[in-house]
Image: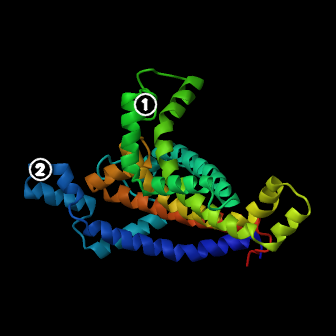
Amino acid sequence: MSLGLFLLKRIAYATPLLVGAIVLIFVLVRLAPGNPVDYIIGEMGADPVVVARLMADMGLDQPVYVQLYRYVLQVLTGDLGHSFVSNAPVIDLILDRLPATLLLMVSQLVLSILIGVWLGVLSARKPGSSLDNAITIFSLATFAIPVFWLGQMLILTAGYYLHWFPIQGMVNFRAGYTGWEHVVDVAYHMVLPVTAMTLLNLALIQRLTRASMIEVLGQDYVKVARAKGLTEGAVLVRHALRNGLLPVVTVIGLEFRSLIAGAVLTETVFAWPGLGRLTFDAIGTRDYPLLMGMFIFMCALVIIGNLITDLLYALLDPRIRYS
């Protein structure tokens, strides 16, 4: 089977799942307490006629199944609707915040993979050693710490007391940097949120890499490679690591679905202007169209992550075929 046909087949399988997810999320969002009208009119309340007019304008006076039917037809045309709060197109709001989130998420994902795999290989070389035990304790400790608490501790220590890094935002608007100064300023603001998410995510990658590499290093072909006189580095990189990374690839694919979920907490703590903060604000205002648009985007990320995982499997293991 060709690569193109394989991708089309996987997308065809994913389409019913996406539709089912849209239906489920739509119903759950509507069943949640509160509605956008409560946020718009505020705590003081308003005339019942005004409330009824707002409900009708938003289409919330119709039964849920009617709202769902209209929304699905709307999505099939590529229209995610308009925000109830800002009245801006949902797709424009998502695309406007997407670069900031991608910058944060891709940076932490790359660092998590590099550091996690490196620590996993170090642990696997001498299981049970002092180094292995130290890395294990470090990984389990970082995995157990909630990202919002870790973020607050980084803000308190590295930001507030030591004044090493800025604690909020993406840029220093008062400085008005341009060119390379702007790039450096953004990187400077990224340090704390990227550190928080990297410490959280590298633990799972490290543990999986360690377990997989210990198993691979005990295989016969690795022993043959050592018997041929290859250096330990050559054995690890050329023979063991490629097969040892297969379980890690699975985790990387699953990481796509947690990118936005983790971004909600991280971006809220660090006031990072990305999709996570946008989702948090949409939840607070019960902005149904924006919430649905974000959830659809998350589902699309999961599908893309699964496709990338399948492609990486075939790249790392030539025995795997597109069939």
Q: Can you give x and y, in whole percent of width and height, for residue 69 in the image?
A: 37, 73
- Identify the residue shown where x is 54% and y is 27%: 182
Q: Which is nearer the eye, 225 or 99?
A: 225
Q: Residue 89: in sight, yes or no?
A: no
Number of marks present in the image shown? 2
Which quadrant, please, contains the N terminus?
A: bottom right
Q: Can you give x and y, in whole percent of width and height, for residue 243 in the image?
A: 74, 66
Q: Is mark 1 on a helix, strand or loop?
A: loop
Q: Residue furthest right?
A: 228
- Identify the residue shown where x is 69% and y is 63%: 245
Q: Quadrant of residue 2?
A: bottom right
Q: Residue 57: in sight, yes or no?
A: yes
Relative to 289, say whether 246 is above or below. Answer: below
Residue type at the position of mark 1: Pro
Q: Which residue lies furthest to the top in this view?
A: 175
The residue indicated by pointer 1 is 166
> How was this image coloured?
rainbow
The residue indicated by pointer 2 is 43
Q: In which quarter of the image is residue 174?
A: top left
Residue neighbourhood size for the residue with mark 1, other residues' Cα within 10 Å, grouped as few (<14), some (14–19), many (≥20):
many
